[in-house]
Image: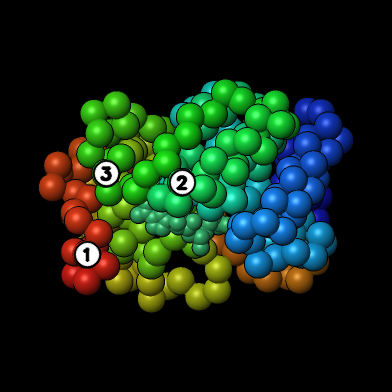
Amino acid sequence: LEKASIDIGESKSFKAELALEYMRLVLAKNQKMNLTSITDPLEFIEKHIIDSLVALDYARGDISLIDVGTGAGFPGVILKIANPSLKLALLEATKKKLAAVASMAGQLGIGPIDFYPMRAEEAAQMKGMREKYDVAIARAVARLPAHLEYLAGFVKVGGQLVAMKSGQIDAEILSAKNAAKTLGFGNIELAEAALPYSGASRKLAVYTKHAPTDRQFPRHNSLISNSPL
Ligand code: SAM
């Protein structure tokens, strides 16, 4: 963590132990269902745990954060372990995966966490979730224009939308310029980190919302994928 310049605050060893315990639970569950293709513990620590923590600067304090398409709980569960004050919501379309995450988080005793076993396009139109979050984040869910459309409806005006990416993202950011503007986002801030063992580069594209998102967004999934904004 020092090597990657990530500060997880107080109770470092307790939090590290919780994160490792989460890894053990995921790897055990992974024997019975498909949660992750990464099964080597060192690789898991780097590509799931440390990679999730690269976004910690956007998950500080007692803000509300929704992790969209959390899969096996990344980055959301790890951010909650590092910052127990986080008001965390996890959304995932595959109900079975989210049930597994809920059960493992329960075993670790890291609640409360809100779990939404549904698609982002439905949830983002629900009154209780529309523009209710300080931060919406996702890793490895879609290319940037679709990523923005899936997440935009959750973010409060003044809040942030975070896209966790790797490799070259300049072209992707350019291709998402229209989507960002249409969905109510202005400023974009880029953060970069190198993972400590492999040196692989990670990038965060962070958009700030300056206007409400029009109710027509997010559109139906087929439109989001077939005619991106
Ligand atoms: N975020 C996790 C990670 O980085 O390890 C999982 C990434 S996995 C490649 C993408 C996940 O997003 C899958 O579990 C998939 O079911 C979920 N997903 C994709 N589109 C979604 C949508 N529109 N609404 C909710 N979940 C979605």
Among the two numbered marks 3 and 2 on one chain, the one whose residue lies closer to the N terminus: 2
Mark 1, mark 2: which one is toward the viewer? 2
Report which quarter residue 35 is drawn in. bottom right
Does the residue at mark 3 contact the one at mark 1 (Cβ under 8 Å)? Answer: no
Q: Which residue is mark 2?
A: 95
Near mark 2 (Cα within 10 A), the count class, few <14, some 14-19 or many ≥20, is some
Q: Amino acid at mark 3?
A: Glu
Task: From the image, state whether disc 3 or disc 2 is nearer to you.
Answer: 2
Q: Callout 3: few (<14), some (14-19), or many (20+) C-alpha neighbours within 10 Å? A: few
Scheme of image coloration? rainbow
Badge 1 amino acid = Ser
Chain-order first, disc 1 or disc 2: 2
* Badge number at residue 222: 1
Foreground of the two, 78 or 210: 78
Mark 3 vs mark 1, CA separation in Å: 13 Å
Work out which quarter of the rendered image holds the C terminus and state it. bottom left
Q: Is residue 82 visible?
A: yes
Is label 1's Cβ within 8 Å of ligand 1? no
Please state which of residues 211 and 71 is positioned toward the viewer in this rendering: 71
Left or right: 85 in relation to 90 = right
Q: Which mark is residue 122?
A: 3
Depicted 55 relative to depicted 155: above or below: below
